[in-house]
Amino acid sequence: MSLTRLGQCFVSLGFAGFIFLSTRADGGIPGIWRTERILEKDGRVAKDRLHSKNNPHHEDYSFLNAVGAVWPYGIAKSAAGYDAATGDTAGTGFLIDRCHVLTNMHVVYTDEVVMDPPVGRPVAFAVGQTGSDRDRGALQGLRFLLQGSVIAHGDTIIVDRRVRNPDNDWALIRLAAAVDGSITAMTLAAVDVAQLPAHFTLSAAGFPTDHRRLRGDGFKLKELWGSDGQVVGVVPVGADGALIQTTIQTTPGNSGGPIYGDFDGRKHLVVGMVQSIRGNGIDVSDRMPNVQVLFTPGTVAKITAAETQSPCR
């Protein structure tokens, strides 16, 4: 694999005609743009980031502790606790350093029509798995709740909650305070598209809302759900963008989560981001693979420039 190290970045889906015809917004949920298709043969598993013994084959998923929940508004705890709807309205994002988070633009800008919105939008980000369900001071399983604001975003246009040019569906969040040093940011890389073979294994992680609802509380965020899948194909978009078709399973709430894999002996490199569902990644024979973002160098420069102008203290 040929890799180009990225500063801090992501690139969203492109090929707007294909995506626009096959996707719609899921009501007011900021998590994902998707079809009506129902997930079948659910192969997603919970990723315990603190206790490897709780994972299949005792894998170490501590690197995924950088993946957190993103809200398109600030969150404060009252005497009565957190609003019960808070867990249901969260999307996904992930740390790229101690104070910057990447997610989709459609996760943090949720109006029906969005065109060149102003930066500075207040958001919230919770991250870091708790050690026990008894930690009542945490946001339902996440240790750190941090306020922040959007400092840069792509030039995506959203009409009727449909992303018209999803190759620019990105947003960079600057947190008001840096995250605890016990959580390591994820590493991003641009993959040479010509060398990304079919059947190559990639993975995703996030907070799908259907699993939150299945728990009966609509709020639980301790369990980070992951899915492994295979590359079905890569579709170039315009001069610089690209989307990737995979059998990774994602549902609403996963938007903004990392797509990662192992390349050239380097583990867990983030090469894309969850942005859209077409077929829920059930299997290749279903002829309905999921469509996700593939990072390209073009968007990297924009993200890096915005990050450099707002360094962590």
Image (cartoon, rainbow, N blue to C red):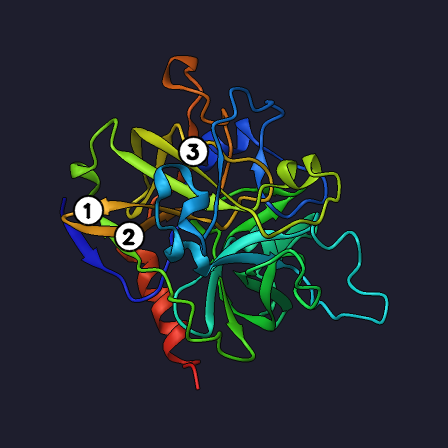
Camera sees residue 13: no
* In the image, residue 260 above or below residue 138: above
Identity, as a three-letter code, of the amino acid under mark 2: Leu
Is any part of residue 239 visible from this angle? yes
Q: Using the image as rendered, state which of residue 132 and residue 153 is in the foreground.
A: 132
Numbered circles on residues, count: 3
Quadrant where the N terminus sits is: top left
| Location of mark 2 (residue) | 269
Farthest top residue in view: 285
Instruction: Pick the residue in front: 260 or 19.
Output: 260
Residue at image location 23% in from the left, 45% down from the top = 262
Q: Which mark is residue 51?
A: none
Q: CA distance from mark 2 to mark 3?
A: 19 Å
Contact between marks 2 and 1 (CB within 8 A): the answer is: yes
| Quadrant of the image occupied by residue 109 | bottom right
The kind of secondary structure element at disc 2 is strand
CA separation, marks 2 and 1? 7 Å
Q: Residue at x 40, y 80 (%)?
A: 309
Looking at the rendered image, the quarter that the C terminus falls into is bottom left
Q: Which residue is mark 1?
A: 263
Residue 208 or residue 135, whichever sits in front:
135
Q: In this rendering, would 185 be left or right of 268?
A: right
Residue wearing tag 3: 291
Give the percent coordinates (x, y) of residue 306: 41, 73
Q: Secondary structure at mark 1?
A: strand
Residue drawn at 27 percent across, 56 percent down: 297
Q: Residue furthest right?
A: 80
Looking at numbered disc 1 in the image, what kind of residue is underneath it?
Answer: Phe
Nearer the N terminus, badge 2 or badge 1? 1
Decide: few, some or many residues near mark 2? Use Cα within 10 Å; few <14, some 14-19, many ≥20. Answer: many
